[in-house]
Image (cartoon, rainbow, N blue to C red):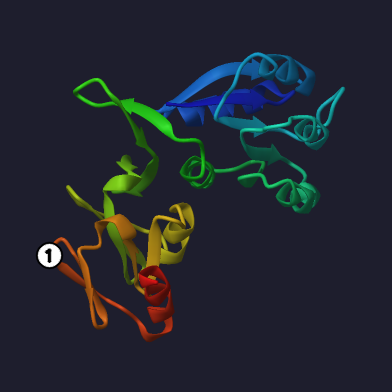
């Protein structure tokens, strides 16, 4: 589960964000905070994975609050003021949502934050804890939660991207470059303008192609250096 706080002085903003999060099965709200001081007090004795943070609040502004946290969780800024974007990126926030924002844009921000978030613990059938990170993929008007560890490779297909996992292939209407940005850079390698592969699923590398399961993936000339660095 991904635990989160909403920090915003507007009640309607809480309703919108919680409504969006309720559509995602692994999101758990820990507290509604209507000013930064309330959030600061909560975080003194509790931890969360993600904060939805408004900026223009009474008592203590959003970025000033963020600067007080020694080890802040992942932060998605939600604000009606576009001029604060640059300062937000300097503080290494995960994403910046300009109000009003759509569910699709919200989902992209959550995917971006979760893919880099602390590892979520899940229980196997034997009862032992394993590490798992997930991503939501939108296909055929539904959102499918996929464990990143199961993704073998992704492939550009015109205006779509195929995400090939151990169990299935999911086709989504996103650019392959946008999906690559959501995946952990240490675990995935772009080997062609149309392909990125999961390093852990590479079976062998032969000449200008990579074998994953029973599928050969071409290595593009411009991306061969990425593969060469992997083999060093």
Seen at 62% across and 31% down, the residue is 51
Q: Nearer the viewer, residue 107 or 213?
A: 213
- For image coordinates 67% across by 41% down, the residue present is 99
Image position of 95 (left or right of 225) = right
Looking at the image, the residue that sits furthest to the left is: 214
Q: Residue at x 24, y 20 (%)?
A: 127
Q: Looking at the image, can residue 163 be seen? A: no
Residue 48 lies, with reference to residue 110, above or below; the image says above
**In the displayed structure, does residue 60 sit left or right of residue 69?**
right
* Residue sitting nearer the eye, 149 or 21: 149
Q: Quadrant of residue 74?
A: top right
| Farthest-out residue, front | 232
Residue 227 lies, in percent from the top left, at 37, 74
**The N terminus lies in quadrant:** top left
> Whole-percent x and y of residue 15?
58, 23
What residue sits right under mark 1 in the picture?
Answer: 214
Q: Residue furthest right?
A: 59
- The secondary structure type at the circle numbered 1 is loop
| Residue occupying image coordinates x 42% and y 58% | 179
Q: Is residue 223 visible?
A: yes
Left or right side of 81 for 29: left
Give the image location of residue 143, x and y in percent. 34, 41
Task: Determine whether 59 is above or below 138 in the image.
Answer: above
* Quadrant placement of the C terminus: bottom left
In the rendered image, residue 77, in percent from the top left (x then y), is placed at: 67, 39
């Amino acid at each position: 589960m991904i635990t989160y706080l909403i920090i915003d002085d507007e009640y309607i903003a809480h309703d919108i964000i919680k409504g969006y999060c309720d559509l995602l099965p692994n999101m758990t709200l820990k507290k509604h905070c209507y000013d930064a001081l309330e959030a600061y007090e909560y975080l003194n004795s509790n931890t969360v994975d993600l904060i939805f943070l408004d900026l223009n609040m009474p008592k203590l502004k959003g970025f000033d609050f963020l600067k007080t946290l020694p080890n802040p969780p992942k932060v998605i800024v939600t604000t009606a003021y576009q001029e604060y974007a640059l300062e937000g990126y300097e503080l290494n926030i995960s994403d910046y949502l300009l109000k009003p924002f759509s569910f699709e844009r919200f989902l992209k921000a959550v995917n971006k934050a979760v893919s880099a978030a602390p590892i979520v613990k899940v229980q196997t059938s034997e009862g032992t804890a394993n590490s798992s990170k997930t991503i939501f993929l939108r296909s055929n008007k539904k959102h499918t939660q996929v464990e990143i560890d199961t993704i073998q490779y992704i492939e550009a297909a015109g205006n779509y991207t195929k995400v090939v996992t151990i169990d299935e292939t999911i086709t989504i209407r996103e650019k392959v470059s946008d999906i690559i940005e959501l995946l952990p850079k240490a675990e995935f390698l772009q080997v062609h303008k149309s392909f990125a592969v999961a390093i852990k699923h590479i079976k062998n590398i032969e000449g200008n192609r990579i074998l994953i399961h029973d599928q050969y993936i071409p290595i593009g000339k411009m991306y061969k250096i990425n593969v060469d660095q992997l083999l060093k």
